[in-house]
Image (cartoon, rainbow, N blue to C red):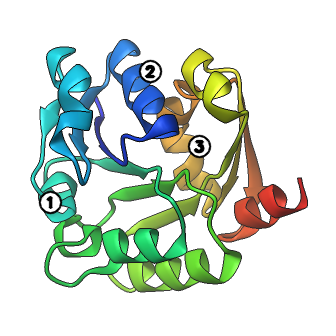
């Protein structure tokens, strides 16, 4: 079973992590506030103290964060970020609303280390996140997306591949 790491247990992310656990994935979580993770830990998730630790323990990492500065900090911090802990071939799906420029920058940094980065913003709000009735627009390598889409299917009922990295963010902005 694919090991999933989830960072950002706020309004949307808490529901996403819950849905991954319900779908039977092996889930490790991280948030700025450990108390946000308590329901997930009681449901069987594991805790990681840093994004780097989470990345090292998982195959696929997902984030649901407030915006580009937070996403870049979590993804690119050279000492404790995802890029410092992910193994070559690992996959990162950013479910946040991000800028195409930012996600392409992250994608380039990840590609240089043989890591796969996807922008996968969602539409459907907190109700959709809880019910699994939402759209996810994905930008990145199509073959890697198809190989890893099961974790996205656990989150939304309208998962769509849009194109190259940044295309998901553009689709979200247009929507």
Mark 1 is surrounded, within 10 Å at the Cα level, by few (under 14), some (14 to 19) or many (20 or more) other residues, namely some
Q: Is residue 166 left or right of residue 16?
A: right
Let me know if residue 127 appears in the view: yes
Placement of the N terminus among the 4 image quadrants: top left
Between 80 and 66, the one lying in front of the other is 66
Mark 2 is surrounded, within 10 Å at the Cα level, by few (under 14), some (14 to 19) or many (20 or more) other residues, namely many
Image quarter for residue 159? top right
Residue 127: x percent and y percent? 65, 22
Residue 174: x percent and y percent? 90, 61
Q: Is residue 20 left or right of residue 139?
A: left
Residue name at image x 67 percent, y 25 percent: 128
The residue to which callout 1 is attached is: 50
Look at the numbered disc 2 and give the secondary structure of its residue.
helix
Task: Identify the mark nearer the N-term, 2 or 1.
Answer: 2
Let me know if residue 156 appears in the view: no
Q: Are marks 2 and 1 in contact (CB under 8 Å)?
A: no
Above-or-below relation of 143 to 83: above
The residue to which callout 2 is attached is: 19
Task: Identify the mark nearer the N-term, 2 or 3.
Answer: 2
């Amino acid at each position: 079973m694919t090991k999933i790491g989830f960072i950002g247990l706020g309004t949307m992310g808490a529901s996403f992590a819950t849905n991954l656990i319900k779908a039977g994935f092996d889930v490790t979580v991280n948030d700025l506030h450990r108390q946000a993770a308590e329901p997930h830990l009681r449901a069987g998730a594991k805790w990681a103290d840093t994004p780097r630790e989470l990345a090292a323990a998982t195959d696929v990492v997902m984030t649901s964060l407030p915006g580009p500065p937070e996403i870049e900090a979590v993804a690119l911090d050279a000492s404790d970020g995802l890029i410092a802990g992910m193994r070559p071939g690992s996959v990162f799906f950013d479910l946040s609303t991000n800028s195409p420029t930012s996600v392409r920058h992250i994608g380039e940094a990840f590609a240089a280390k043989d890591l796969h980065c996807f922008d996968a913003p969602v539409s459907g709000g907190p109700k959709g996140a809880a019910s699994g009735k939402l759209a996810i627009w994905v930008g990145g390598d199509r073959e890697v997306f198809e190989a890893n889409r099961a974790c996205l299917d656990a989150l939304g009922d309208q998962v769509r591949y849009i194109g190259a990295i940044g295309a998901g963010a553009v689709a979200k902005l247009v929507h």
